[in-house]
Amino acid sequence: MLSYVGRRLLQLVPLLLVISFVIFVALEMAPGDPVTLLLGQNASPEAVAELSAKLGLDRPLLLQYLSFVTDAVQGDLGVSYRSGREVAFELARTTGVSATLALTAMILAVLIGVTVGIVAAVKQYTFIDTVTRVGVLAMVSLPVFWLAILMIIGFAVKWPIFPAFGWGTYGHLVLPAIALSTYPLAVIARLTRSSMLEVMSSDYVRTARAAGLPERTVVMKYALKNALVPVMTVIGLQFGGLIGGAVLTETVFGIPGIGRLIVTAIEGRDYPVVRGAVLLGTVVFVLINLLVDMLYKWADPRQRGV
Amino acid sequence: MKHPGKTWPRRSAAALAMLTSLTLAGCGLSSGGAEEGAPVAAEDATLRVGMASDAQSLDPPNFSLTADFIRLDLMYERLVKLDPDGKPIPGLATSWEQNSDTEWTFTIRDGVKFVDGTDLNAEVVKINLERAIKAPQGKGYLGVIKSVELVGDKQVKLILSKPFSSLLNNLSVPVAGIVSAKAIKENEKNLSANPVGSGPFTFKSWNPDERMVLERNEGYWGTKPKLKTVEIVPIPEASTRLAALQSGDVDVIEYPPPSELSLIKESKEINELIEPKAQPVFLGFELKQVPDVKVRRAIAMAIDKEAIVKDVLEGVGSPATTGLIPPTMVTPADDPINIDYDLEGAKKLMAEAGAGDVTLDLVLPGSYYLKDKEVAEVIKSQLKEIGVTANLKIQESGTWFTSLLEHKTQMYWLGWGVAAGDPADMLTRVFRSGAVNNMSGYSGADKEIDKLALLPIKTPERESLMNDIQRKFIEEDVVVVPMYYSTNFYATRAEVEGFHTTKSSLWDLSGVTVKK
Amino acid sequence: MSAAVATAQSAQGAVQERSAWKETWTMFARNRAALIGLVILAVIILIAVLAPWIAPHDPTAQNLSLRREGPNAGAWLGRDEFGRDILSRIMLGARATLLAAIGVIVLSGVVGTAIGIVAGYRGGVADSLLMRSVDLVLSFPYFLLAILIVAVAGPSLRNAAIAVGITYIPQYARVVRGATMEVVGKEYVEAAHASGVRGFRIAFKHVLPNISAPIIVITTVGLALAIVSVSSLSFLGLGAQPPSPEWGAMLADGRQYVASAPHISIFPGMAILLTVLALNLVGDGFRDTFDPTLR
């Protein structure tokens, strides 16, 4: 197990090198230039040249990349062009927020999604099955920004239960977490349903039933644990997506998360922030999936030997 | 990793606490923190303002953008202020004297203390100006200053590299804010996140993208504001911003969606605030790409500015029918500088030009100026009437500005904020040949524009010269089509009284009270 | 094995295939929700195809004095911020929206399937090389990747579709690779191989038809996702450009009027909801039909 984890972590190194290089080339190709943007009305050619030199942007791309890698290896991700704050600080302040939001949303999604999935599977082809399935599908069918705006108008203006925007208290967490949870919730509910159906028609569940165990025990004790194995993989994938994919939710609710940081940084061509955030996103994504794979091995005995 | 921001470990800890006690989330639904509790006296109230974007940098001459000027203005003072008519009045300088075309002497105010306890004196001013003329943004406004000399303890002499009559205007821009010399010396890097000034408010905290808190400067030399605290929160989404105002989460917002004005007007809880601003918005032509002046004139004649302002901007702004410079800044010419809307005439002119069907790109930013995308769509449909197909190229604000600077446009959409309050600055930067921001590549009024720097500001002679220049590039050469004069646009809750803005888009908080 | 036997076998395969499809259809038709989804989808496609002829008004004709007018006899679904007829825009917008979603699927489907088949069929170095590059795309938060691509290429509906398409490649590649590996071991593929049929012909004539079930399932669900993703890019101003109607852009632009003129965004929102819902129902139907363990 330990060597497996080591190997996976080692694989991160070339991955990060390739991704950071791709980002370098992509940003270089993107129209718009950070220096012109920083100077705005005052972008005279001399000022542009001077600031480019100061930021090291006048050097050949490969050289810029090499010095970035050298610095990054030593833990220095550089300084934001725009705010002058360290990239590490920008990442630290936003990651905690995004992680809290994503985790809350994921907990909601898992609790509700798995429940809905089980109920739908147990009551397959009944009215309950149809209603929950259509309801879940309707949730994925709404663009999240639209749902978010409707929720704000409903639960912050019309019935002022929650704050309309911002961050800081539990109340601030509710609406965005619900908005963000809809997609993973639907995915988890569907997968739980089909996975449950598969498991419940398997031999050992039939055996358990034949042995006269009550249906509740069969479902909860025998079927569920096995049915949740594939669900866990999806949770991992979805969680990674949640952290970066919360851009829209963060924008609508005015939440200082990493998604908004990246979008603002891309718009402002704040290269150091974009690079740092994408690298962090990749690391988190890989780590979460590693964690999930380990859980997977633990939960599925057949996988243990592998 | 040491950083001035210093609040983040605490906040991550808070995030962690939030996670561990998530089960309690259901009962922890308070709608906010400090503002609840016993009613506060109007004078010690907090004003919460929702803005479209967060501040970028709080170090005046470095990377501060126009959007940062409002925050800078509350915390930093300049040598010169502008009165509501745009006339320079004493700020941190009590008086000044122009010794020659290129020499000015300023007398520095006595008894001003920075919030770190240090005193303002001529030496501090010298350090600041010398720093500003070398800084990226500072150079743009103050680069004309060649050197700064001390004249005793209370006076500085500025020596310019060439005559520049609007020096006072440029010294009034927040970029020229005077920073504590001690803070510059001890921790210059820190200034972008931790300002140390002498203004009516002092910096308390800033969690980027979340909240900036300013407090009344109790040691302020002038009239102290009635407000105790100002909280500025960024809410990028306009509909959320309005919702936050309606629900009382904030007291003031900038740029409510104009279409909701009718709702605001109906509501007793919310008031609108539309006040003049020194920023014309215009449609420009890249002259090399659209060389036929008849086509340009026909386009100008085919655009119905009045309809655009009334039906698209919902009256937030006024049609630019007296030249590019807003009438609030320069006395308009007796014969209005304008190409009148005349659809039939435009069609005739197009036929005369013999250009046949014309297709032109119109490069514009998406949601940068008020409803820019929508205005462009209406222009497109108006131009269709005269056989001109406008290809809308909506770009990210960054890409758009670079396209303009690189002249990769045929028609472009641009607003020019006259932050220093002197329209001559705009004429020089946008219509003088060789100027970086001369997006049209115009060169027909260089001599007149150069003369502006020699004439004293606010004189009839200078104003009529500005009108001549405008007439030339608007009516004769049709370089740009002035569209509308933008306005400061806010909505406030009824409890807020006395909130006003200046033409330079700054806030006047001196008389603001919030009844709770 | 002689060539004659191989021909006979493939003819027999065709017969089996036909009856297999019939059986599949019977199975699918038993799922009422899926059937409803299919009908809704057919209607929407019909509207999209016929839009220029059946739309009551010119979808780009502005009438500013009637702007934001609510639903009425002249404009059944009301008018937008330019006084344009919303019903006509939704009808015409169905084309742009569906085409963009189809573009996403064609791009990710073709590239992803090709990668999956080659990786699954060849195995070895080709497999690990291809799947590594796929993992590379996957290890990137997908929406950010799309934003980055559009930032580089410039905002337009086409670029938005390409960006979303690229982020969907891994899914196809993985599913197809798995299915291919399963199929490759089967007799008929080995038989074709033995009779000297070349690699890619095998892949396309023998492997592809036999892995169509998982492809159909992820395609229907993928179409649904694509519509939502492209509309999300429109929200950030990175999708369809005016004045051409597209649902996501209509919804995104209409959100600023949601308090005073909700119909401007509600109807395009409902169009998206209905289409995506229908696609998902059909996709679920296929999944249930093709996966015998779920019956």
Image (cartoon, coloured by chain):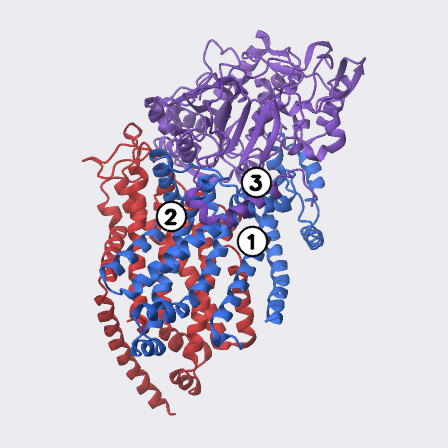
Circle 3 packing at 10 Å, graded few (<14), some (14-19), many (20+), is many
Q: Which residue is mark 2?
A: A143
Residue that numbered label 1 is attached to: A281
Q: Disc 2 and disc 3: Cα gap in Å? A: 26 Å
Q: Is residue C7 visible?
A: yes
* Residues at discs 3 and 1 in contact (Cβ within 8 Å): no
N-terminal label among 2 and 3: 2
Residue indicated by mark 3 = A268
Position of residue A58 relative to residue B196, above or below, is: below
* Image coords of residue A34 (percent x, y): 61, 40
Q: Secondary structure at mark 3?
A: loop
Whether marks 3 and 1 lie on the same chain = yes
Which numbered disc, 3 or 1, marks the residue closer to the eye? 1
Q: Residue furthest top?
A: B460
Most distant residue in the right direction: B152
C-alpha gap between disc 3 and disc 1? 19 Å
Q: Looking at the rendering, which quadrant does residue B497 occupy?
A: top left
Q: In which quadrant of the rendered view does residue B305 lie?
A: top left
Do the dots labelled 2 and 3 sit on one chain? yes
Nearer to the camera, C219 or A124: A124
Name which residue type carries label 3: Gly
Whether residues under marks 2 and 1 lie with C-beta atoms below 8 angstroms apart, the answer is no
Crowd rating for badge 1 (residues with CA inside 10 Å; few <14, some 14–19, many 20+): many
Q: Nearer the viewer, residue B227 or C62?
A: B227
In the rendered structure, the colour chosen for chain A is: blue
Where is the C terminus of chain C found, in terms of image quarters? bottom left
Asked if residue C149 is positioned above or below residue C185 in the image, the reply reads above
- Give the quarter of the figure containing the N terminus of chain C: bottom left
Q: In the figure, the purple chain has which letter?
A: B
**Residue at 54% over, 38% down:** B209
Q: Considering only order in the chain, which callout, 1 or 3, is on the residue closer to the N terminus?
A: 3
Look at chain C in the picture and name its colour: red
